[in-house]
């Protein structure tokens, strides 16, 4: 297997885990690309709808950031530079007015 094929195989094997801000939610992006969302018992009972949405969103963003970090590192490991892959910057959460729409 040549270097480029190994690189693509390693990229495909990335497993990223993200935990929400208040640690109620964990998101796992497995090597097969499936996303598993795990919610700790009590979240739906103790939190408002908006807090639940915020927890899920923060866990998804954390998993995405971790995936990007691993991907950038593979670029450095294989090619000596992360050129073409910027660090992940999460988008700003929507404000209350945008949430209503």
Image: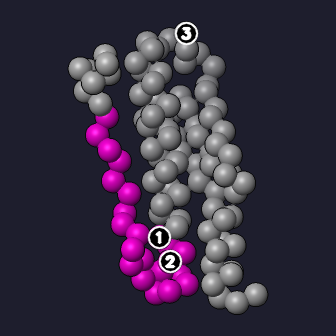
Could you say whether the residue bearing mark 2 is in a helix, strand or loop?
helix
* Residue 32 in picture, x, y percent from top left: 72, 54
User: How far is mark 3 from mark 1, CA to CA?
Assistant: 39 Å
Give the foreground label among 3 and 1: 1
| Main secondary structure of the magenta stretch | loop
Marks 1 and 2: CB-CB under 8 Å? yes
- The residue furthest right is 1
Give the mark nearer the N terminus: 3 vs 1: 3
Query: Which residue is at 28% across, 40% downward?
Result: 92
84 lies above or below 63: below
> What residue did someone put label 2 on?
75
Give the foreground label among 2 and 3: 2
Q: Is residue 8 magenta?
A: no
* Residue 23 in picture, x, y percent from top left: 51, 33
63 or 22: nearer the viewer = 63
- The residue furthest front is 101
User: How far is mark 2 from mark 3, CA to CA?
Assistant: 43 Å
The residue stretch that appears in magenta: 72-93
> What residue did someone put label 3 on?
45
Q: Residues within 10 Å of mark 2 (few under 14, many from 20)?
A: some
> What residue did someone put label 1 on?
72
Q: Residues within 10 Å of mark 3 (few under 14, many from 20)?
A: few
């Amino acid at each position: 297997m040549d270097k480029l094929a190994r690189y693509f195989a390693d990229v495909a094997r990335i497993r990223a885990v993200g935990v929400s801000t208040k640690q109620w939610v964990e998101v796992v992006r497995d090597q097969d690309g499936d996303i598993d969302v795990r919610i700790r018992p009590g979240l739906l009972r103790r939190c408002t709808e908006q807090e639940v949405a915020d927890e899920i969103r923060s866990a998804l963003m954390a998993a995405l950031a971790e995936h990007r970090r691993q991907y950038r590192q593979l670029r450095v490991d294989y090619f000596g530079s992360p050129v073409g892959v910027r660090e992940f910057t999460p988008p700003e959460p929507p404000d209350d007015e945008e949430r209503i729409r």
